[in-house]
Image: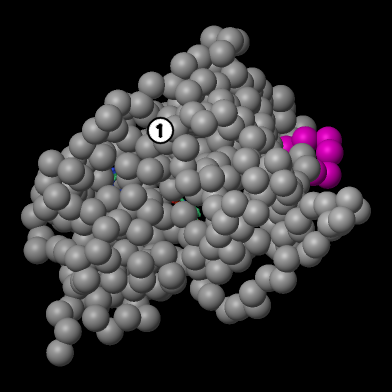
């Protein structure tokens, strides 16, 4: 019989339930501990989720004294860094929710802890498990587009501002960038093979979140609800990135990959005011190219599937632990995603272009 993996959950709010629901579908996994800083919350979660053999803790460091193969870090963004570093130092593998961290420095420390302790650090970008996201990457990597020199991505909601911890800088670190921007960055960068970012020139604002007309917690809102950036990468590629939680517009446009031989227009799946921000599935991919001198638009057939993206991300973590495989979405790679967000926040604050410096770890 295969070994039963022992898993701990740090942070028992909304997304922790999605992790637990995925773990519970596996008979080779046992959730043995849950930690939440709010007194009583972990015990209530254990009860509600039917985790009969799990122990509750308030301090994640106590949870880490348990014999665990891995932990899911499901805290608000600001706590991702310390809980992940502590878990890695305690010899546990880590699946951390997105965004990886709040600052680039924190992301670097997380990767260093992973390497130092020879433990896995993987980041929870579930859209990666959409087979059509894999198709998109294969198309971009196939060479059919020629040299890809420009990518445009991001997403915009006309009205789609969350509340709670997401709108407070002390808990979330950033707003729309951290909540949804990191997804579109991951899609674009993953398709390109995660090139190294060099510079960024950015702007951000929060005209909607701070206005009581648009947000019921406007008095607590101190993150950005809009961001736009021009990012330069190694190998002469540029990214035009834009993200919005709220605006007087229906869309900030499709995701585009421009190559010297062909271009791709990519639209997300789903409809409704909270959709269109690349936290789910690919809706359509169209290739623009010339055939015998004729301007041609070819819809790329998508794979119909019923893949549960959230389950797949948890399974990828479990299977990597069991099979001793590398992290499915490695911290070293997502460091570059975090470096861009960090650069956007710095550039927007300074109102000028800034360099992005990523050490070789
Ligand atoms: N992948 C996705 O689709 C997705 C969706 C939503 C949220 N998220 C991410 O998941 C994370 C959590 O979001 P949420 O909506 O579940 O938030 P939440 O506020 O509902 O839950 C977070 C929980 O963590 C607890 N907590 C805070 N600091 C802690 C610490 N140091 N140790 C232990 N517990 C701590 C809080 O008390 C709270 O119960 C965020 O980083 C968010 O970006 C991912």
Q: What are the residue bounds of the magenta stretch?
A: 245-251
Q: Is residue 248 magenta?
A: yes
Name the main secondary structure of what is drawn in magenta.
loop
The N terminus appears in which quarter of the rendering? bottom left
Give whichever of 17, 87 is nearer the camera.
Answer: 87
Q: Residues within 10 Å of mark 1 (few under 14, many from 20)?
A: many
- From what the image shows, is residue 357 above or below residue 117? above
Residue 60 in the image: state x and y as whole percent. 20, 49
- Quarter of the rendering containing residue 225: top right
Is residue 81 among the parts visible in the rendering?
yes
Is residue 167 among the parts visible in the rendering?
no
SS under mark 1: loop
- From what the image shows, is residue 319 above or below residue 256? below
Residue drawn at (59%, 52%), measured in percent from left and top?
Answer: 143
Residue drawn at (17%, 84%), measured in percent from left and top?
Answer: 2
Residue drawn at (72%, 59%), measured in percent from left and top?
Answer: 285
- Quarter of the rendering containing residue 328: bottom left
Give whichever of 159, 95 is nearer the camera.
Answer: 95
Residue drawn at (34%, 78%), measured in percent from left and top?
Answer: 24
Q: Is residue 33 left or right of residue 310?
A: left
Q: Residue furthest front?
A: 292
**Residue at which label 1 appears:** 102
Q: Residue furthest bottom?
A: 1
Q: Is residue 278 magenta?
A: no
Residue 141 in the image: state x and y as whole percent. 55, 53
Residue 102 in the image: state x and y as whole percent. 40, 33
Residue 277 in the image: state x and y as whole percent. 65, 49
Give whichever of 338, 21 is nearer the camera.
Answer: 338
- From what the image shows, is residue 14 above or below residue 343? below
């Amino acid at each position: 019989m295969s070994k039963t993996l022992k898993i701990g959950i740090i942070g028992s709010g909304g997304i922790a339930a999605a992790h637990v629901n995925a773990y519970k579908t596996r008979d080779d996994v046992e959730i043995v501990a849950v930690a939440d800083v709010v007194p009583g919350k972990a015990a209530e979660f254990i009860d509600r989720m039917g985790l009969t053999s799990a122990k509750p803790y308030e301090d994640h460091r106590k949870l880490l004294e348990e014999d665990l193969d891995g932990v899911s870090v499901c805290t608000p963004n600001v706590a991702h860094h310390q809980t992940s570093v502590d878990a890695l130092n305690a010899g546990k593998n880590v699946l951390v929710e997105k965004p990886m961290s709040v600052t680039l420095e924190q992301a670097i420390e997380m990767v260093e802890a992973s390497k130092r302790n020879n433990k896995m650090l993987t980041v929870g970008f579930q859209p990666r498990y959409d087979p059509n996201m894999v198709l998109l990457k294969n198309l971009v990597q196939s060479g059919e587009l020629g040299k890809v020199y420009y990518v445009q991505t991001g997403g915009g909601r006309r009205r789609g501002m969350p509340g709670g911890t997401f709108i407070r800088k002390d808990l979330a670190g950033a707003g729309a960038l951290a909540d949804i921007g990191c997804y579109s960055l991951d899609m674009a960068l993953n398709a390109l093979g995660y090139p190294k970012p060099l510079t960024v020139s950015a702007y951000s604002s929060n005209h909607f979140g701070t206005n009581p007309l648009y947000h019921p917690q406007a008095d607590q809102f101190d993150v950005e609800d809009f961001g736009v950036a021009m990012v330069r990468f190694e190998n002469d590629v540029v990214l035009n990135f834009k993200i919005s939680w709220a605006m007087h517009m229906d869309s900030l446009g499709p995701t585009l990959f421009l190559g010297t031989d062909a271009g791709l227009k990519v639209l997300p799946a789903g409809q409704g005011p909270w959709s269109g921000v690349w936290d789910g599935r690919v809706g359509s991919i169209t290739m623009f190219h010339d055939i015998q001198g004729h301007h041609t638009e070819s819809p790329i057939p998508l794979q119909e599937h019923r893949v549960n993206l959230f389950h797949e991300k948890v399974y990828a973590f479990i299977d990597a632990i069991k099979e001793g495989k590398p992290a499915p979405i490695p911290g070293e790679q997502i460091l570059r995603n975090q470096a861009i967000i960090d650069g956007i926040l710095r550039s927007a604050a300074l109102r000028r272009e800034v360099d992005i410096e990523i050490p070789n770890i």
